[in-house]
Image: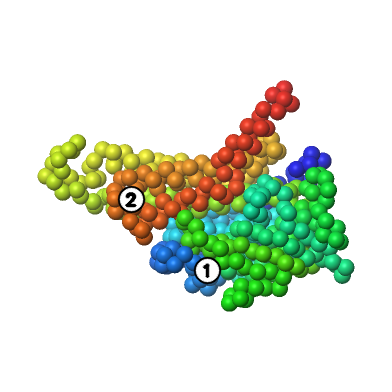
Amino acid sequence: MATTETDDFQAASTTSAFDATLSEADFDRLFEQAEELSEYFREIGPEFDEKNTFAFPSIERFKATDLGAISVPKRFGGHGGSLLQTSKIISELSKGDSAITLAYNMHYIMVGIAGGLMSDEQNEYWLGRVANGKELMFGPFSEKRAGFSGLADMKAIPQEGGGWKIYGTKTWGTNCEAASIITTNATITDAEGNLPETFEERVAAESFFIADFGFDTETLEGDGLRVERSWDSLGMHATGTHVIHFDGFFIPESGFICEWRTGAFGVLEWASLTFASIYLGMQARVLEESRALLSKKTLGAVFGAIAANEVKVSGVGHIVDGVGEMASRYEICRRVLYQTCNEVTEGKDDDWPLELRFPYIGLAKTFIAENVMWMTKHAMSMVGGQSFRRGNIFERLYRDSAASLFQPLNGDQTRTYIGEYLLQPDELED
């Protein structure tokens, strides 16, 4: 980010909380919907984990609720939910099935990010469609060579009649099979498709867009785009995250939102804290399943470190301590997430160094991610060999938790951002 754009960055960072006017009574009604939908996700999750495909039946069930518009401001037709209220909904859905929820989490991310950066006119149109038409958003941004921090090689070529045609490939099209609105980034070129020559010009030309999205589910082709059903992952099977190839996909002038780098970094809490919410919900599921099994499990007659005619696992020291440790970690993670959501909503992040705003917010996600991986691994150790069988809930939670390593910022990126800032000579002088 160029230093001359700091003021724009600062302005963007104040828009992300929306209007946060959802009453607790109305939130309770929405949370009941989330509880019911979570149970449905839990019911169908194993089938689509086994099939390794997006959970298509979940689309209509999700749209039948009012949950997609929880964070849309009331002035645009939504419920005006806060970041924390949205987080609680996501965690509840994740308790049912984290993989299915991860797909719809992309919708929440993009409603938050785009909604915090679009003009009132754009929000009235696009978020109005989300609230009234119950349409879903998604946002492919990563490119294979670039990851999160690399500037976009995808080109947005200006057209004579206005607007742009974009060309390139995005590798993480989460929720593309349910969404009808796309948000993405591309670098604006000259009329011949040449990228800017200098780094500063590349940063300034990388832009954030929004447009209608759709494709034929048989041919996987749309107008100027093609979907490659590439999702074949270790876990999170039902998420259905695919590669999107753009070959002249048109975006009208009204689809330009802002410069990407100066805008996005001011609202990325809608990514890091909603991802954190996914894994907090998974922690709750790990603890639930562990308690249900270990409170009833017996080993029969045992000879070894423990010798007895009948051993109940719930009385074995390391099992007792292990469940207690998991419960403790969940509670600490819950407090970290909720407090971070509240601090961002209340504007307390304004007291942090500007360059550290995103990694400091992201600490909640990296902390929860590290703990959910510990919990799934430890649960398998306590449950025993049955947890290693394919399709067992612990086997699936173990696989699905690994996805927490990759959403930005991950732990390594976070520590690098913070360490580089703290070791600058100017900062040391301060």
| Sequence-first tag of 1 and 2 | 1
Using residue 372 as the reference point, say whether residue 182 is left or right of it: right
Residue at the image point whose x is 36% and y is 60% from the top:
391
Residue at the image point whose x is 80% and y is 64% from the top:
164
| Residue 147 point in image, percent of width and height | 64, 49
Please state which of residues 418 and 65 is positioned toward the viewer in this rendering: 418
Relative vertical location of residue 92 with respect to residue 348 in this rendering, above or below: below
Labelled pair 1, 2 in contact (Cβ < 8 Å): no
| Residue 137 point in image, percent of width and height | 63, 64
Crowd tier of the residue under label 2, counting other residues whose Cα lies within 10 Å: few below 14, some 14–19, many 20 or above: many
Question: Farthest residue toward the top?
Answer: 429
What amino acid is labelled 2 in the image? Ser
Using residue 408 as the reference point, say whether residue 123 is left or right of it: right
What amino acid is labelled 1 in the image? Phe
Q: Give the total of numbered labels.
A: 2
Crowd tier of the residue under label 1, counting other residues whose Cα lies within 10 Å: few below 14, some 14–19, many 20 or above: many
Residue at the image point whose x is 62% and y is 68% from the top:
227
Cα separation, mark 1 vs mark 2, equals: 28 Å
Secondary structure of residue under mark 2: helix
Residue at the image point whose x is 63% and y is 32% from the top:
419
Using residue 236 as the reference point, say whether residue 151 is left or right of it: right
* Circle 1 or circle 2, nearest the eye: 2
In the rendered image, which residue does mark 2 sit on?
A: 290
Q: Is residue 145 visible?
A: yes
Q: Is residue 92 visible?
A: no
Using residue 128 as the reference point, say whether residue 161 is left or right of it: right
| Residue 239 point in image, percent of width and height | 52, 62
In the rendered image, which residue does mark 1 sit on?
A: 62
Relative vertical location of residue 38 with respect to residue 277 in this rendering, above or below: below
Question: Farthest residue toward the right?
Answer: 160
Give the label on residue 412, or none: none
Q: Quadrant of residue 412?
A: top right
